Every structure is written in C-alpha cells, then in structure tokens.
Image (cartoon, rainbow, N blue to C red):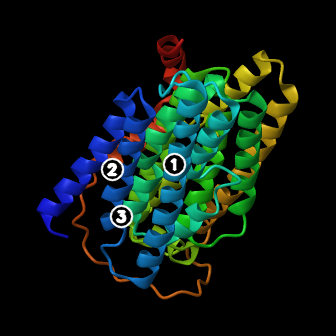
Amino acid sequence: MNPYVLVILLSSLGLGTTLTFASSHWLLAWMGLEINTLAIIPLMAQQHHPRAVEATTKYFLTQATAAAMILVAAATEAWMMGEGDINNLSHPLASTLVIMALALKIGLVPMHFWLPEVLQGLNLTTGLILSTWQKLAPFALIIQVAPTIDPYLLSSLGLLSTLIGGWGGLNQIQLRKILAYSSIAHMGWMIIVLQYAPQLTLLALGMYIFMTTTAFLSFKLSSTTKINTLSLAWAKTPTLMATTALALLSLGGLPPLTGFMPKWLILQELAKQELPLTATVMALAALLSLYFYLRLCYAMALTISPVTINSMMPWRSSNTQSTLTLALSTTITLGLLPITPAILALTT
C-alpha cells in the first residue's frame, strides 16, 4: 500500500476514535464510529485475496447494521424524550437498542458470529488493529451509557460472552480464530463488572490490549497462523516461543503473570457485591479459555524433537521486522502483577 495512503488511513482511525471519545451527542459519536469503520476497510481488503474481501464485506455489513441501530436509537430518544445527549439516555427502547448495537460493534455474545470469520480472513497486523484499537470507541460509549442499561441485560451479555468465548475456542486449529474467541471471552469479563466498578473495566481493557498485542506480534514475527506450524517454531526461535507461551498463559489469567490481575480484581468485586454464583461461573468459564491456551503452549513447547511432526519445516529466512513494540508489550504482559496495589490506588 502507498505509504501516504496508509498514513491517511491510520490518521483517520485515530480521528474516528478521538471524535467518539470527545462527543457528548449521539450524532457526533455515530460519525466517529463511521470514520473508524471506513478507515479500516481499505486496510482489511489490501491483499485482494478472496478471503480478505469476504471478511471485509462481512465486517462492513455488521458495522453498518450496528451504526443504523445507533441512529434509530438516537432518533427514538430524541422523538420520545427530546434529548440527544449520550449521558441522558432514558427511554428503555433506545437504551436497549444502543447496548445491542455496541455489543454488535465489539462482538459480544449473541452478536459475536462475525468476529471469528472476519479475523480469520485478515493478516495478523490488521487483525491486531481490529482486536484492540477498534474496541476503544464502542467501549467508551458503553461505559457512558452503562448506568441507564438494565443490570440483568449487562450481566447476561457478560456471562454468555465468557462462556461462549471459552467453548468456541476449544476445537479451533487456526490461531486467529482462537484469538477471536479469546477476545469475546475477555469482553465478557469487562462487561460483567461494568455496572459495579467501571475503573476495573478500563483496567481489564488495558491489560487485554497489551496481552493481545504481544500474542499477535509474536505470531507475526514467527509467521505462524495454525497450530501445526506453531509446533515447528521452537527450533527456529526458542526464546520467542518461550515468551509467547508465557504471554498466552497470561491471557488465560494464570498467576504470577499480568493477566491474573484483572480477573482477580473482578472476582473480588463480584464477591463484594454479594454475587458468589456469578463469580463462580466466571471463574469456571476462565478454565475453558485456559484449556485452549494450554493447547497452544503444548504445541509450542512439548512437540519438539524427537517427537515426529507431520508438517514441512519452514525456511529459516532472516528476520527484518522491528521487535521493540513486541519487547515492550511482552514485558508488560508478563511482569505487572507485583504493582497491583499501585494500580489499585490509581483506579480507586
């Protein structure tokens, strides 16, 4: 892609998200979301591969549907209540339409079906943008409208997302689909605690972005998109595969890694709110996600020689990619748990 065009598209991505962050009216927020969608579509379709074009089409249709729902909700609110402000959403139909539209935007269950298919058709760099940056603008709106949403609806979305995100990834062999179901499960953790402690939602979102960045950049550096090729990567880059395995365990929420922090604090908050059953279901659902991360770790670390592998060995080509971002995100992904008290002091 032409570098000037790339700069324009990336700038538009930043502009769309910033516009939604700064907006107090639904029309301005809708414009920011639309700029975001239109900016990433050329990045998704740049390979001119049938699968990439199919993924781009699916993404456009789902995002356009969600944008139309937001417009209908804003029009309903303006018609019934005479209000267009984001913080003053008071009509039940408008608030339900908005949360469903934003759930479709970020891929919450039961509006999650597009996410694994779209992510599978993209390269790892665009998939990283879709899994991290594209979640920010809808999440900013969800946090703003959460006080006006039915608590049972939010709890249902969170629980279902965590369960389906864990179950859906169990039988996958494509890494991008596994990361898509991982994204769905993490979104569920963020939504479930939103009505009780929004600062924990922001903390979980930040940790998720760092951990997912580490996973995507590690797979990109080792040029792996399937479990079969992942099993061959240890012989080429043992240090990278060791840190990748730890990053995946961090995504699963194992101590003493960073990923344990948001899950621990969310379960603690649910227990404080006297929701032991919800906390138990969430903890058990985390085990489902942990299982498919362990599958990846097994393929990376425990299928090396002398175990016979039914795949062709890849070429040992020299690597020219920058690894500074990966190094920074890996450090954050693996080592932030000891400073949990400091982070708690900042968020409370």
CA distance separating discs 2 and 3: 10 Å
Mark 2 or mark 3: whose residue is earlier in sequence = 2
Q: Residue at x 56, y 58 (%)?
A: 179
Q: Residue at x 42, y 42 (%)?
A: 30
CA distance separating discs 2 and 1: 32 Å
Give the answer, above or below, for where 303 lies relative to 196.
Answer: below
* 2 or 3: mark nearer the eye: 2
* Front residue of this view, candidates 64 and 335: 64
Q: Position of residue 330 (x, y in %)?
A: 41, 44
Q: Secondary structure at mark 2?
A: helix
Residues at circles 2 and 1 in contact by the CB criterion of under 8 Å: no
Q: Which residue is mark 2?
A: 35
Which quadrant of the figure contains the C terminus? top right
Mark 2 or mark 1: whose residue is earlier in sequence = 2
* 2 or 1: mark nearer the eye: 2
Residue type (three-letter) at the residue carrying disc 3: Ile
CA distance separating discs 1 and 3: 29 Å
Please indicate, yes or no, whether residue 301 appears anywhere in the rendered image.
Answer: no
Q: Residue at x 53, y 74 (%)?
A: 226
Rendered image: mark on residue 41: 3
Q: Is residue 294 left or right of residue 115?
A: right
Residue at the extreme left = 4
Give the answer, above or below, for where 146 lies relative to 341.
Answer: below
Q: Residues within 10 Å of mark 2 (few under 14, many from 20)?
A: some
Q: Residue at x 16, y 62 (%)?
A: 5
Give the answer, above or below, for where 37 lies relative to 188.
Answer: below
Q: Which residue is mark 1?
A: 247
* Front residue of this view, candidates 108 and 297: 108
Residues at circles 2 and 3 in contact by the CB criterion of under 8 Å: no
